[in-house]
Amino acid sequence: MISRNRGLLVALMLLVAVPVMGLELGDTAPKADVQMKNVDGSKVSISEMSGEEGTLVLFICNHCPWVQAWEGRIAEIGNEFQTKGVGVIAVNPNDPAAYPSDGFEEMQKRAEKVGYEFPYVVDATSDVARAFDATKTPEAFLFDENGELVYKGTIDDNARNPEQVEKQYLRNALEALVAGNEIPDQVTKALGCSIKFREG
Amino acid sequence: MLLFVVGSGRAEQNSRSVAKPDTIPVSQVKLKKASVDHILGTIPESNAQVTLVNVWATWCQPCREEFPAILQVYRELKEEGFRLIFISADFPEQEKQARRFLANHGVDFQTYMKTDKDQQFINALHPDWSGALPGTFIYDDSGELLRYWEGRAEYSRFKQAVQNVVTK
């Protein structure tokens, strides 16, 4: 039998409810000065990668099939807009103890294979992802020239089949940003792999 | 009343061991492609007093890890009006793997594969769900969402969430 009197239940459940947090449009990038190890062995921060037109921060990894489905498009978009004044940095927040294929050497191989011409760095504590309230890979955060978040979400509306994409959310946002136009869809979603945060 | 509880993805304390499931032949697996609207529409039409919807995929490690715990809760409470709906978010070409996984876990009841585009699917389940897998949603007998969380959970969390609704 279901209890029809849910007043007490609801009150009890509210006590443990956690508000949904997330980086909001207009926010600046948190943890932007954290130095993260790039696949080329150098250290780089989000601040150092900021571009004249804006900055694109991508949380990605190696193991996730959703990332794998999109990684060609991620490389294409990132490489292209890096030449148009947008700073681009891809961040891997996953604990390689959970996903060995997300380890540093595997990241190096992946970056070369996929053709990332932008930094692909290790979020060594997962704290950058936590600060962004990133929950999954892939997840994109685009900041404008003032450092304010103008787009967050996914790559496009069809991970599985690039030829059947109807809405190129991230590309459209980048094109609008560079052109100085209003971004059409500022918050978008797709399924993805839960980030395996490193334990403190 | 909606309650938003976003999981950290960290493992919770497991209160008990989870029994190994009996397997069934792949031919007995009931996996149907369906829209999220169709799936959710079955909730108030069923006689279940509480329904747990779990979105999973064969490629999702935390989904695979929590799967036996959800099934254990189902087996313990199904006679008390608890209905379990698994929705696979696998790509269509992974259907065979999904069927094999379900067979290996003895899932002999109706389950589904999503057909909607991601954003539509996510927002229909809850606009605040980020889309990170796994996602778990708990509904009452009228189909009203009571709570949800994303990320892996343990047996104790599933059991408690269902028992909060089912009168013992």
Image: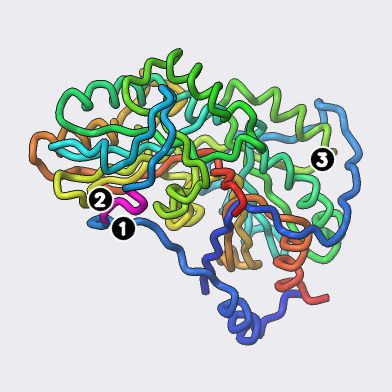
Where does the C terminus of chain B fall, quadrant-wise?
bottom right
Q: Main secondary structure of the magenta part?
A: loop
> Viewed as shown, does residue A70 lie left or right of A57?
right
Asked if marks 1 and 2 touch (Cβ < 8 Å), the reply is yes
Q: Callout 2, which amino acid?
A: Leu
| Observer able to see residue B60 | yes
Q: Quadrant of residue B163?
A: bottom right
> Viewed as shown, does residue A85 lie left or right of B100?
left
Which portion, as a residue range, is magenta? A28-32
Q: Position of residue B115 (x, y in %)?
A: 52, 35
Taking the spot 40% from the left edge, 44% from the top edge, the residue there is A189
Mark 2: few/some/many CA within 10 Å (<14, 14-19, 20+): many
Q: Position of residue A63 (x, y in %)?
A: 57, 28
Residue A149 numbered mark, or none: 2
- Write down the residue under mark 1: A24
Asked if marks 3 and 1 touch (Cβ < 8 Å), the reply is no
Q: Nearer the viewer, mark 3 or mark 1?
A: 1
> Viewed as shown, does residue A22 lie left or right of B27?
left
| Observer able to see residue A191 | no
Residue B108 numbered mark, or none: 3
Secondary structure at numbered mark 1: loop
Q: Quadrant of residue B107?
A: top right
Taking the spot 69% from the left edge, 53% from the top edge, the residue there is B11
Q: Position of residue B36 (x, y in %)?
A: 53, 46
Q: Callout 3, which amino acid?
A: Asp
Secondary structure at numbered mark 2: strand
Secondary structure at numbered mark 3: loop
Taking the spot 50% from the left edge, 32% from the top edge, the residue there is A61
Q: Residue furthest top?
A: A113
> Viewed as shown, does residue B29 lie left or right of A67?
right
Instruction: State whether residue B108 is above or below residue B153.
Output: above
Q: Callout 1, which amino acid?
A: Glu
